[in-house]
Amino acid sequence: MGGRDATMVLLDENGIRCDGRKIDEPRRIMIKAGGLKNADGSAYIEFGDNKILVGVFGPRDVHPKHMSNTDTGILRVRYHMEPFSVGERKNPAPSRREIEISKVIKEALEPAVMLEKFPRTAVDVFIEILQADGGTRCAALTAASVALADAGIPMRDMVAAIASGKVADTIILDVNNEEDQAGQADMPIGYMPSEEKITLLQLDGVLTPEEYKKCVEVGVEGCKLVYDLQKKALHDKYFGEKAD
Amino acid sequence: MADRRKYVIPGDVVTTGPFRPEQNVILDGNKIIATTIGISEIYDDSVKVIPLTGMYIPKIDDLVIAKVKSHTSLSWELDIHSCYVGFLPAQDVFGRDFSAHADELSSKLKTGDLVAARIANFDRTRDPLITISDRDLGKIDSGILVEISPSKVPRLIGKRGSMIQMIEEATGAAVTIGQNGWVVVYCESPEGLLKAKKAIQMVNEQAHVANLTDQVKEMLDKKGES
């Protein structure tokens, strides 16, 4: 895509990847809680070259009314890529891929959010991808969890997400755009570290059963790193310098 | 006390052991896990988290400040700054002999009016039922509305009302605090009104500060001299 070098070396003999990382090293991650005044909760994440802004509203009235559920609240997620988020202009209308990712993120967040406390209401999550560089769904899920916590919506745990994958027959952590395009497998994982539960697991590519196990393990360890950064972002906003 | 209070975020284990989970915590095995951002408090047999963020959830017997949104021929709909709409039946205002034909609801409460109200009934299946037929309740004719976060209301009231008493005494204002985070301030003098409003906003912004009472007192005293 975009005239990438097809002969690029994804993993050299010293175990260094195309962007200089080691095999189990994630990209630079920066998470900030809050930032949007008009949303009930918000978060901003920079995950390598991904830049994502998330706003959360709710719990609030459901419109249209027929969507509401008398037993529980509902969660609505919109994942949207800005036209300028990728190399060639993206049509801003929701694409098949965006609709799928919205659904996947919604289902990954549902086990964490205690919607049953707010029957007949909706919680809306709006995810805007400002800049995309592979692994946006994981970064978006990570930021959405922080924004939900910032909105004060009761949660059993926060969902942290990262992708693991396989390039040059090696299992790696945090797949970037080049590795996603040219690699052998890509496995986004969403994980609730305190609950020790996986809420998102997709796989694109072919893995042996052993590689699959290794891939999940690497991903879960990566999620724990992301989780610490999520906690730090919320600590910074709410408890400031006197964080314990 | 320092080790009994802790800053927590969702998923944090507050403590383990035989405790009763109260507000904003869940029991998972023998672990007590926080479900919201806040300050955890451990008592002799129970654990709770005081939230630092979040929306107002109606509770029976709460005093709230409500804004009239609209009315039908039988009831008013009130905005109580929550995810649910308050429901005020006309009988509550007109009395038992209310007749939908003879009585015009807008003669008592118009859209946009503020009322001090109490949550009479609320459960998962219905919208909160509001009453204004009690002492100190009813339409609010004067004063200004100050909005604060519902989670900061206990801080504004203070221990046994210490914070709000101090603000009222220093400014001569009458302050009505709704549990939903809406506060009505009334004061004869414009200076007192502005000062009270500023003090309330200060509590809202700096609710996490330890010796907030002293700081608010200092602010109130300083403005008095100038």
Image (spheres, rainbow, N blue to C red):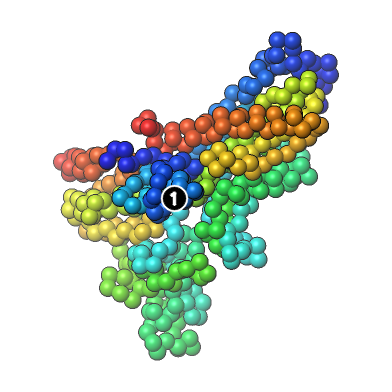
Residue B111, can we see it?
Answer: no
Describe the element under mark 1 as helix, strand or loop.
strand
User: Left or right of B222: which side holds B36?
Assistant: right
Say few, some or many: other residues with alpha carbon within 10 Å of mark 1 (under 14 / 14 to 19 / 20 or more): many
Total count of labels: 1
User: Quarter-wise, where is residue A187 in the image?
Assistant: top right
x and y percentages locating residue A230 in the rendered image: 52, 34
Task: Name the residue rendered at 73%, 39% in the picture.
Answer: A202
| Front residue of this view, candidates A54 and A24 | A24
* Amino acid on which the number 1 mark rests in the picture: Val
User: Left or right of A81: which side holds A43?
Assistant: left
x and y percentages locating residue B173 in the rendered image: 22, 56
- Outermost top residue: A14
x and y percentages locating residue A37 in the rendered image: 49, 43
| Front residue of this view, candidates B176 and A236 | A236
**Circle 1 is placed at which residue position?**
B25
Task: Name the residue rendered at 48%, 86% in the picture.
Answer: B100
The quarter of the image holding the N terminus of chain B is top left
x and y percentages locating residue A157 in the rendered image: 53, 44
B175 is higher (above) or lower (below) than B50: below
| Front residue of this view, candidates B71 and A116 | A116
Residue A175, can we see it?
Answer: yes
| Front residue of this view, candidates A61 and B46 | B46
- Outermost right residue: A6
- Outermost left residue: B225
B75 is higher (above) or lower (below) than B85: below
User: Quarter-wise, where is residue A89 in the image?
Assistant: top right
User: Left or right of B101: which side holds B152?
Assistant: left
B24 is higher (above) or lower (below) than B131: above
Task: Name the residue rendered at 70%, 40% in the picture.
Answer: A201
User: Quarter-wise, where is residue A24 in the image?
Assistant: top right
Task: Name the residue rendered at 47%, 51% in the picture.
Answer: B26
